[in-house]
Structure formats: structure tokens, C-alpha cells
Amino acid sequence: MQNKGLVKFFAILFALVSIYQLSFTFVANKVKDDAKAFAGGHPEKEVKYLDSIGKEDVFNLGFTKFTYNEVKDKQINKGLDLEGGINVILQISVKDVLKGLSNNSKNPIFNKALEDAKVNQKGNQTYLDAFFEAFDAIKGSTRLASPDIFANRNLQGEIDFKMSDDQVKKVLAKKVDESVESAFGVLRSRIDKFGVTQPTIAKLGQTGRILVELPGAKDVDRIKKLLSSKAELEFWETYKADEMMGFLSSANEALKATVKEEKVAEAKPTDSISKLLTDKDKDSAVAKKGNNPLFDKFVSQGGGPVLVVASPKDTAAINGYLKRPEIRSLLPADKRYVKFVWGKPNVKVDEKTKKETETLDLYALKGNRDNVAPMSGGVIVDARDSFDQMGKPSVTMQMNGAGARIWEELTGRAYTQKSFIAIALDDVVYSAPGVSSGPISGGRSEISGNFEVSETKDLANVLRAGKLPAAAEIIQSEVVGPSLGEIAIHAGLISSIVGFLLVCFWMVFYYGRAGWYANAALLLNLLFLFGVMASFGFVLTLPGIAGIVLTLGTAVDANIIIYERAKEELREGKSLADAVKTSYGWKGAMRSIIDANVTHVLTGTILFVFGTGLIQGFALTLLIGIFTSLFTSIFIARIFIDRDIAHNRDLTFTTGLTKNWFTGFHFDFVGIKKWSYLFSSAVVVVSCVSFYFNGLDEGVDFVGGRTFQIKFEKPVESTTVSDELSKAFGTTVEAKVFGEDDQLKITTKYKIKEEGVEVDKEVNEKLYNGLKKYFGPGVTYEKFINTYDGKKVGVLQASKVGAAISADIKTNSFWAVIGAMLVVGLYLVISFRKWQYSLGALAAVVHDVIFVLGIYSLFYKYAPFHMEMDQHFIAAILTVIGYSMNDTVIVFDRIREFLAGDRKGHFKDVVNASINTTLSRTLNTSLTMIMVLLIMFVFGGESIRGFIFAMLVGIVVGTYSSLFIATPVLVDTMSKEAIEDIEKRHGN
């Protein structure tokens, strides 16, 4: 090998750089362990500790020092599945942006196009493009630049009524991008102040989606509220309770004629409501329980700005009543624009029973024709969390000059009229104070109420960061508890160590001393791989660990190809030096190695481009592993081999036991092609029939839904839990054993098409209420839902995939599989310069994909582990495609070599010889991969077991198809003239 010294230099340099980069991870982990020990299980203390030492030196190399913040930035970051935390994808509502740009246009064509766009939006199509398509279909003579649509005051100077639709579309696209960018900035500002370590926020292309990852975050409901809150702060004048009581009484009377009498058991009007409804001198029918559709929903009468108090479960019904046109028509003319809004939940604890009761206050805001508040939060220049005069948590605000003047006018009117001013955030009233000491000047105000300290901190945070330009809907989320992360890390370590040792043992067992050289290269390969990940700040995930373990199997593939070729050369009588030189040459093993690894790189790249989150982690480690393993396998092992040659050591690439293994085969693979075709056709037919009758177990990634991994205190019956939750939710809820008998994976599609934090919380509460009988009294809602260190029972992991993003995932997955096959097929056409090679490889790959899908379709109902179609499964399919191509390419390279050489025999004989002479490499690599995958299947953890099983089946089937499908198809598609030419050149 030439430039041996240069190779050694770079190998040592890369090793030192990798060790240097990895040292930051070890130091960061030590500091985190110290923080956990100091915090004693209190996450907030842990965060404060780490923040306090952020600028302190924690790593001294003698010639330079690093602070904790610097060390933290250089470590290998762990994904949420290993670290625990919350991951969400937010969809900025482009519909809201367009409505805002149109100044809330009432144009019927425009509004119908907005609704049609939401209904007709296709997978991977942006809402804006869907809106343009919908508008063009129904616009008639209406133009986007109409004065009542976009040629308005908001867009003055950018859009005028003379512009064409195409011109307007360009401006709108720019404005939507600006809104997403603005939302990105607002969210980043909120997150930076939230107090988690190493938060991640990133825009996902031009989709209007924003990815947010908060490692270590634990308060699920609080974080979702913080992220999705639009922070639309408004100040409204309110009506007093006695001003609206006449309307409520009239509404109650009117509803009696249309609302069916409710069950007596459900009506529980309190004394205050009874007094309100009945005359003091006589007992009327109005007082009869169950005969008041509206008032029976109230818990008690309010006072001041509070009209009434109600239970959360009744607010939807009350809202429905008050929005009815016939009920709205009962409003006096001076109150026809009234806006009914609920307040922040009030929680009271009964001193005797310790039972919590939650209620909400109803307010009547003085609305107007345009539904615009007298003053908005845009006037706020600063907001701080503090405490009011009673020592309760509050938020103080400072307004700008214009806001201060309006505030003085509002408070002046409230003082004169003895009325109240409601402070509402996202249509929720946080407080409605009166004014007792005259108009308030200076623009300073305070929001007080029934707050926790964390709530005032979050409220001040969102007010300082500003409002989002449009609603941010959580369309996908995942919550992983830290205890689950610890289990995943343990499973990953076990599978990695066992897999590594098993591969090392096999290489030494089969190749003797040469196997030790391959193992040394493999160990260095792992160091380089982790070093690269640390250097570029890549994130390590559980599928990423699976990718690393899989790399252990593929890393020795190049060594196997080289060693097998060297053995062939030695059998032909060449010296060790000549055999090694030939095997490392382009006409020896290099061409096959390059072709095989290019197919891997292509499929890995497609997997990275089309995958998201954890799947990208898997693809990334595979891609890095391909390049590092090529370097170590080709150059590092060669250094040891050349040293043996220089010292005249005997190196045979075998052991006494394995010397003749997989040699001397003369099997007629082409001759039995009819039987292999028959078998494979039968498998394809059975699979297709199963697809039709059984279908596939599509996970929430593809159909949308919510999943919860729940650990119980003792084993439970999954069918019983499924039935109970289905009744509680009013729709089918699936419960399956996940690993152990005391752990279930619960899936529901309840309200998956509805977005909003309130819906998410409703689902969480229904789940808790439906399962709390299985837990002790100490498991509260917060402990059940939220994550914390040492959590043993309750929700360990939760994920949500909205209907819109599931369609995109499905589309991406389809094109990823099709794209991988076509791209690799195109490469084979270019590399082999005959389409028959590409067709044979594609036929084998299609066969393998259908085979794996068929296995999953036939057995997903009976398997003791989950066999879902999700993103992990697609990753497995793409990996199978890469491996199948890899295996086929090795055989095809040998066929090409033999056909170009002087091998004697019929075309069929040359092809059979090609397969038989590469059989040792094929079976050896397959056995190595199967061993590694079996280790991962056993020790890798329940969450990736189905994913590993798909690869395991795929490797076995891929080995079969490369021998019995790909080559026969190549033979059968060769033209008669080409075969005659080949046989003529080979002496027949």
C-alpha cells in the first residue's frame, strides 16, 4: 500500500480528534450527575444549578479551559427517547395569516376558498397552494386584488387593485414566509426563557411548520400551552351581572321550548340560582329542578363582572345555547354585540374530603361591530412576574405612550361608571378589576388572580416575547419520560456491547489472525463514528444506536469481501503479497465494495431526506458508519496485513476449522429458477390476498391518532382496559400489551382532527379518569401525565400525530421507498451499462418489500410484539432495499468480471460459477448481520422490536432473492444475440 505513513498519520490524527471531542461528553455527563445529586430529585433545582455554573470552568486541559456552557455545546446530544422531554411540531395557521392580511374580509368567494383549501389540501401540499387552487376554481370574475380582499389598507403599497392574481400570489407567499419567520422568533424567545437545557427550535422547510424539542421538560400541559398560546392580549370593558340577568332569564325561558327536559339527577341548581329563578312570594314551576335548560347548567350566581359560575363540563353546552341566533336575538339593541367569554379555571379544595372542584366564571364583554378590543397587547413594552398587595403571584405590565393614554381613558370610564375592565389573553379572562381611585395614568397595570408562580412566569414570558402572528396548532407531539430514556440507554448499551463482541468473535473464529485485524479496524471505526457525531453536534437516538449496532455488521462487510477475494487468489497459487495486492485492487474487491456501498449511501440519503426526527438519527449513523467503516476496513486492516507480509508471517485468512467452509459449491441456481419463480410468485400472491383481507396494522404515523405507553402498578387485562376506555371516550380505544403484562400501549383517534391545547388536555383527563382506579390514591393527574425523574407508573411516553401531518408522512414514506428503488436502479444502469442488471436487482427488491409487507400483514394480529406500519418500519424497508442491492451487486460484479474474462463455459455455467464463488461472502455477511439483528431483537427494547424484526426478515429474504431471483431475471432478460456473443467468446 502506497502512502502508508500518510494513512497512519491521518488515522492517529482522527483518533486524537475523536477522543478530544468525546471528552466533552464525559465531562458534561459528570457535571449533570453532580447537578442531579445536588437537586435531590427536584428538576427546577437541577436546572438552576446548571445555569449557575454555566460560565464557570469545569474542564481544564492545561493549555486551555472550558466553561460548562462550552462543554455542553460540544457534547454528543441525546435525543428525547434517551434524555426524556417533549417534542412538538407546530403548524402556523396560514389560514389565519390570510384572514389577517385580508383585514378579515367578508367576501364569500374568499372565505369559501379558505374552507375548501383546508378540506382539499393534499399530502405535502402547503395550505397556501391549496388556497390558490381553491380560489382559482371558484373565483369567476373575483380577483385577489379586489378592494374587499387584499387591496386593503393592511397591504397598501404592496398590493393594489390593478395587480393580477399571479402578482398578488407572490406577495402573499412572501407575507406568509414573514409570518412564519415572525412566529419562529416569538417561539424562540419564549423557549429561551423557559428554563430547559439545550432546547432546539427549527423551521421545517417551507411547510409553515416549526419543530421544538425541549430535553428534560416535564410539565406537559404547561409546555403545550406556552408553545401554542397566540398571546393575544386584549382589554375589554364588561357588563355587570345585573345588567345581563334579564337576558339570561329570557334565554332560559326561550330554550324550554327547544331543549328536551334534562334528567332530574343532572340538575343541581344552588340556592342562589333558585332564588334568582323563583318569586319570593310563590313557588312557580320555574323552580322545579330539571326544567331550566340554561340555569340548570350553572353552579352559582356571580356578582360584579361575573355573570354566573359553571362547571367545565357544561361550558360547551352553555356556549351552544348563547350562540343560537334565536337566543342572540333576545339581546337588547345596545347589547347586540356582547361577547361571552369564560375566565381562568378556579380550583377549590374541600377541607374535609380534600377533593378538588374546578369552576369557571362567565363574563360579558362590551363588543362592537368589528369585534375589536379597545386596547390590545401590542401596547405592552414590558411584563414581569411579581406579587400583588395580598402577596399572591401576579404580572405587572408597562405600556407605551399610546397605550397609557387609552388605559387612562378606559380606567376613567370604569371609575365613573363603577364598572370593570376585563384583561383577556387568547379569549380567556385572567382578571376583571374595578377602578376605585380614579383614572390610572402612566400606563402601568397588573394582572392578578388565582395564579401559581409558574403561571405568572409563563404569562410574563409570552407577553414579553409578543404574540404569534397566527394560531400555532400542535399537529405532532411526543412526550418521553426520563425513566424510559434510562431504560432505552441500558437496552442500547447491552445490544451494542453484545453485538460488538459477537461480531468480533465471529471474525476471529472464521478468519483467524486476519479477523483480529478486522476487529481492530472495527474498534477504531466506532471511535471515529462517535467522534464525528460529537464534532458536528449530531443527536444520538435509540434508532441511532440501532444504526450503530447495524453498522457493526456492515462495517466488516468490506473486510469479508477483501478476505474472501484474497483466499481465492491464494487457492490459485499466488503469493500472499500478490493475493493481497490483487484483492485490494480495483479488479479485485474494490469495485464490488464501491458499488455495494454506493447503494447503501443512496438509500441512507433518501432515508435522511424523507425521514423525520428519530428516523433521521438512524439514517445519519448509518451514513457516517458507511464512510468511517470504509476507511478503517480498507486502510487500517491493510496496515496490519502489510506488516505480516513484511515480516514473512503466514496469513491464510482462515482457521483450521473454517478453511473449507462455503467452498467447492457447484449448485445450479439458474437451473432451478422455475421453482424459485413459483415459490416467490406464491408468496407474492398470498401477500396480496392478505393485503386485501387483513390489511396492515397502520400506526398513528400513517393514520393519525394518539398513543400512550402506560405502566401500571400490577398486571392488567388489555381487553378490559380497551372496553372501559372505549366507553369513556365514546369511540374505539385500542389497548395492547407492550412488553410486560403491567404495561400497555393505548391508541385512540378521539378528536384527532381537532387542534388545540384544550383538546389535548381533555384527552389526558379522560384517560386519567378512565384508568385511575388501577392506581393508588397517590397517583394524581399531574403525576399520571407529567414526567419526572424516577417515574415508575403512569404515562411513560405519549405521542400525537395530527391528520394533516400523517398524510404527509404517508406520502413521504411512499416516495422514499419508490425513490430508493429507482435511484439505485439508475445507478446500476450507469455502473453496469446494461438495463438487465438494473431490472434483476429491482425485481429482487420489489420481491423483498412485498415479502416483508406480507409477513407483517399475515401475522400482526398474532405476534407477541408490535408489527405496526410506521416511520420505523419504512426505515427498516429502506435498509432492506440497501442490503438487498448490496448483496445483489456483489454477485453481479462477479458475473461482469467472469463475462469480461476468459472463464470457459455456457452462459448459464458462467452465471452459476459467479454465484457459487461469491457464496462464501454472501452467507458470511448475512450470518454476521443476522447475529447482530438477533441481539438487537432480544436486547434492544420493545420500542424497536418490530423495526428490527422487519430488517431481520428482510436480510434473510434479501439473501434468498439475490441468489434465486435477481440473477435468474438477469439471465431471462438477456437477448438471444447477447447470449450467443457471450458463449462465442467463452469457447462455446
Image (spheres, grey):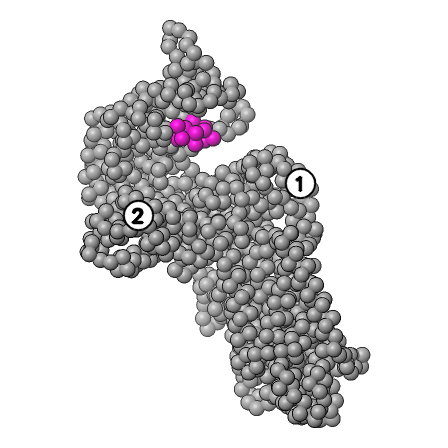
The region drawn magenta spans: 310-321
571 versus 718 height, above or below: below
Residue in front for this viewpoint, 539 or 847 = 847
734 versus 953 height, above or below: above
Q: Assign the magenta stretch its main secondary structure.
A: helix
Residue at disc 2, secondary structure: helix
Residue in front for this viewpoint, 200 or 253 = 253
Nearest-to-viewer mark from 2 and 1? 2
Does residue 226 show up? yes
Task: Identify the residue at image location x=44%, y=55%.
Answer: 122
Residue at disc 1, secondary structure: helix
Task: Identify the residue at image location x=32%, y=54%.
Answer: 136
Task: Identify the residue at image location x=55%, y=89%.
Answer: 3
Q: Position of residue 314 (x, y in %)?
A: 45, 29
Query: Is there CB contact under 8 Å for labels 2 and 1?
Result: no
Residue in front for this viewpoint, 411 or 857 = 857
832 versus 121 height, above or below: below
| Relative horizontal placement of residue 82, taking residue 377 as reference (left or right) | right
67 versus 559 height, above or below: above
Q: In the picture, residue 910 is in which quadrant? A: bottom right
Q: Dot 1 corresponds to which residue?
A: 719
Q: Dot 2 corresponds to which residue?
A: 110
Answer few, some or many: residues within 10 Å of disc 1's Cα (few below 14, many 20 plus, some between 14 and 19): few
| Relative horizontal placement of residue 813, taking residue 584 as reference (left or right) | left
* Residue 340 part of the magenta segment: no
Q: Position of residue 844 (x, y in %)?
A: 63, 71
Which amino acid is tagged 2? Phe
